Image (cartoon, helix red, strand yellow):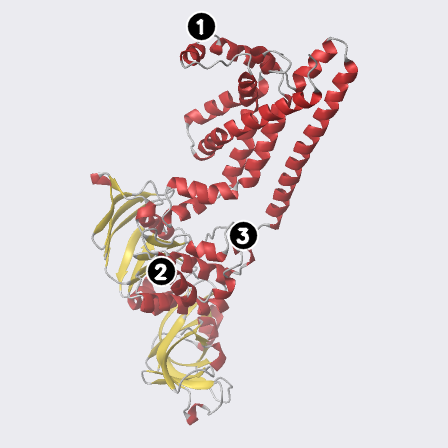
Amino acid sequence: MIELDLTLPLARFTLRVMRRLSGHAVAVLGPSGSGKTSLLESIAGLRAGARGRIAIDGEVLLDTRALLFVPPERRRLGYVPQDALLFPHLTVERNVRYGSPGGEGAEEVGRLFREAVSILEIDRLLARFPSTLSGGERQRVALARAIAARPRLLLLDEPLAAVDVALKGRILPYLLRIRDELHIPFLYVTHNAGEARAVAEEAVVIREGAVVFAGAPEQALEWISQGDPEARFDNILAGSLETTVSDGGGFRGIGVLRVGEARLVVPTEDADPASSRAVFAVSPEDVLVSNRPLVGISARNVLPGAVVALEIGEASGWARIRAQGIEWNALVTKEAVRELELAPGRPAWIAVKTHVFRRLR
Amino acid sequence: MEISDGSILLLTLRVAVVSTLVILPVAVGVAWLLARRAGPGRTFAETILSLPLVLPPTAVGLLLLEALRRSGPLGRLLDRVGIELLFTWKAVVLATAVMSFPLLVRPVRAAFEEVDPRLLAMARSLGSTPFEAFRKVALPLSWRGILAGTLLAFSRALGEFGATILIAGNIPGRTQTLALAIFQRTQIGEDDSALRLVGVTVVLAFVTVWTTEVITRRKAARTREGPA
């Protein structure tokens, strides 16, 4: 439980957040410069100007009326900034060990370290210096450093923003493991509504320093699409993956993902068991939209559906299309919308190639 | 009694080493405050600290002499605890320490200013107290600047003359460093032996300045590579 009653004057506006957040995984969404990073820094105790009250699980970290300010080193919060901020003079191993809890025995400290290293798969990087790491590797090391300090709450500031699209799929699963295996709650700043839906139980949308929405991540979508040019809507698909079914093609490397009534042809790995839970992501750029049935096309996933909503900006925008029980986000140009005469309620077909499905877990 | 060149060199080195070691922790602390604390007093403090750089060394020496004479404020205190300072080698140390202090503070402050404050915030958030963050993050990231400043202050200490001669005199075997000995020998017409000492000082100065250059060069090269 995170209790916030916070005021922080910023250059253009004042950040005011008065919320109780109960979820274990909270996504914080909103345009750049809306105060998301300031919110995380205030909770971490790194903003001297923050006024009000902050309490986590009943422990008060800030109460300016009672003149109480717990310094950052005693808050036990794992802050992971956008740019990772690894200590450049320390190896990866010493970075990860930096915050090892002092009061613990050597055995416990060692266990936390090994756990962090293995969950984020950075064994091979331990002897290297941060300047030799790629963006994705830095993010993983920063995450490992945060969790090895055994925080009571992780504050993740767009941990995937500095990472290119192909790498995102590789970081998101680590976040899911931190959530599901270590049970460390987190506050997660992102522009990606799809990511938010995949990892969070609760979402908060901030604009100009004020909370404009709080609730289920699915319902946050429409709040995000307004006013956030960087907003992204990856399609996140969770379901049961079957690798041995013959009608999935019967080919090696191809399987079927069942999501409700939908059956999607997706790539698989040799190590996959016959049946397992899996999560995939599809970028909205990779979803093709047609206004008539698609035949003679190589894409293995052609689904009939209907347009739910269109949010079109100056040149392009989002088409939300419901097909076989799934709401898909597709990125479309204004011209395509006009030519295909797409409109809410009109039938539409979508096509998704097998290999644009990115495995998240 | 003729004092050998070797013992003059030894005294000079001893004075320079002791004075540099004495001011090092103080200068690092002061540099840290100047680099991190913004405020109205900062420019004033910086100016005061830089005065020894621009004042005639004899002026600084006279001020010290006034403060340290038996009737002066510091002198009375030292007299009570039984410390004899004026015209001893400790006075030489004091004079060189005061004169080289600003030369040590400046590069150290510049190095501290280059440390990303967000890294220090990160260290705090990972459980470090402000002092631990300073020791484990700021200090190691600034070691080149600290070393460069130390060598600079050391080379300044080797050649200190004006302030020294006022509070320590020019006593062969007791307070006579290389700079003072060169002065004395030219005064009595022993130019050849003075030149010999000049040779020694040139070698000393060359080695320290060259080392400083090498260190700062390497630092510049590393910054260009730009480890993000």
Does residue B144 appear to the left or right of A234 in the view shown? right
Which chain hosts label 3?
A: B
Which residue is rendered at x = 49% and y = 57% of the image? A92
Which chain hosts label 2?
A: A
Amino acid beneath label 2: Glu
- Tell me the CA gap for discs 3 and 1: 58 Å
Residue A329 screen position, x and y as percent: 40, 72
**Pointers 2 and 3 in contact (C-beta within 8 Å):** no
**Pointers 3 and 1 in contact (C-beta within 8 Å):** no
Question: Above or below — where is A89 with respect to B2?
Answer: below
Amino acid beneath label 3: Ala
Question: Above or below — where is B153 with respect to A232?
Answer: above
- Tell me the CA gap for discs 2 and 3: 34 Å
Determine which of the numbered discs, if any, sits on residue A107 in the image.
2
| Same-chain status of marks 2 and 3 | no
Q: Is residue B168 visible?
A: yes
Element on which disc 2 rests = helix
Residue receiving disc 1: B71
Residue receiving disc 3: B228
**Residue A256 found in image quarter:** bottom left
Which residue is rendered at x = 38% and y = 68% of the image? A194
As rendered, which of A360 and B225 lies closer to the eye?
B225
Residue B38 screen position, x and y as percent: 43, 32
Q: How many marks?
A: 3
As rendered, which of A206 and A176 lies closer to the eye?
A176
